[in-house]
Amino acid sequence: MSFLAIGSIAIDHLETPFEKRENVLGGAATFISIAASYFVDKPMLVGAVGEDFGEENLNVLKEKNIDLSGLQIVKGGKTFRWHGRYHYDMNNRDTIETQLNVLSEFNPVLPNKFKEARYVCLGNLDPVIQRNVLRQVKSPKLTVCDTMNYWIENKLDDLKETLKLVDALIINDSEARLLSQSPNLVKAARLIRAMGPKILVIKKGEHGALLFTDGSVFAAPAYPLETIVDPTGAGDAFAGGFTAYLAKVGDLSERSLRKAVLYGSAMASFCVEKFGTEGLLNLSLLEIDDRYRSFLELSRIDEE
Ligand code: AMP
């Protein structure tokens, strides 16, 4: 089934307590579409970069068989740049600098083929741009949205308009508390689902994720990794794996949604094992299925 991703495409400057890297390929749409490439053929990518993006980065996306006909390369423009620094526990980070560059004028126009997409994953971006993309897609079967505290704090009304239009929202626990104004995640889930998205995933970093649907809650564990190299993009890898798994199986049953949460978690766990997108680039389908099965094992108890 056809899959479309939109979001930032970035050149990142990353600092963890153990290592620093500059000019690393990043951005929400990058992680989403690379994760998706293991589940769907030719994921469609919508985004903008500048002339500084470079052939090498383009080749990374081409090698993952990503359809780049919706990628604008802005003449004389500079690619979005983000500088992040992680704290010692790696669950927290500070944004040192954000340069919007070509994203400040980003007005996505979808190629005709992209308008037919059935599965749409809206990466973290201005909710007005997310809505603008949704308006162009003719008959999506599933629309999934990500967001962040910046939009909750600065563009709440626009975000709420976007939330009315999407089927699923994927956010982390602190964002869920902020959006719902409730400290309790179960209550937060009820309040957020009333804003529009009937499928809600709340990610809890190294503590797993919760899936809320009609009358049901599913808890996924987190993979117990001993070494986390770089958490950048884990949320986007989750969103890409989650949405593209559903595109692959073509149904939105409770069972498939639960499996999608585990496949999303598997992609996130691969992502954090290396810097930037590196952990997602050379996976085999067997490895992904093995990791999925490890997630199942994590909370399985044999009946006596
Ligand atoms: P995540 O770790 O899932 O939040 O995603 C990290 C990626 O998001 C990085 O590669 C950044 O380039 C990108 N990013 C950071 N801040 C923003 C922002 N304000 N808007 C869009 N993308 C961003």
Image: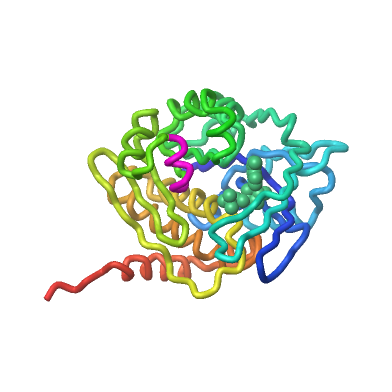
Relative to 37, 57 lies left or right: right
- The furthest residue to the right: 76
Residue 70: x %, y % from top left = 67, 37
Along the line of sight, the residue nearer the viewer: 286 or 292: 292
Residue 48: x %, y % from top left = 72, 39
Q: Residue at x 40, y 46 (%)?
A: 201
Relative to 28, 254 lies left or right: left
Q: Is residue 30 visible?
A: no
Asked which quadrant contains residue 293, the reply is bottom left
On whether residue 178 falls in the magenta region, the answer is: yes
Q: Residue at x 64, y 31 (%)?
A: 111
Image position of 154 with respect to 32: above or below: above
Along the line of sight, the residue nearer the viewer: 9 or 248: 9
Q: Residue at x 72, y 36 (%)?
A: 103
Q: Is residue 116 visible?
A: yes
Relative to 184, 266 lies left or right: right
Residue 269: x %, y % from top left = 50, 64
Asked which quadrant contains residue 216, the reply is top left
Along the line of sight, the residue nearer the viewer: 106 or 82: 82
The quadrant the C terminus occupies is bottom left
Give the overall secondary structure of the magenta segment. helix
Asked which quadrant contains residue 195, the reply is top left
Q: Residue at x 57, y 47 (%)?
A: 43
On whether residue 96 falls in the magenta region, the answer is: no
The residues colored magenta run: 172-179
Total marks drawn?
A: 0
Residue 246: x %, y % from top left = 40, 47
Along the line of sight, the residue nearer the viewer: 159 or 6: 159
Which color scheme did the rendering employ for the protein? rainbow
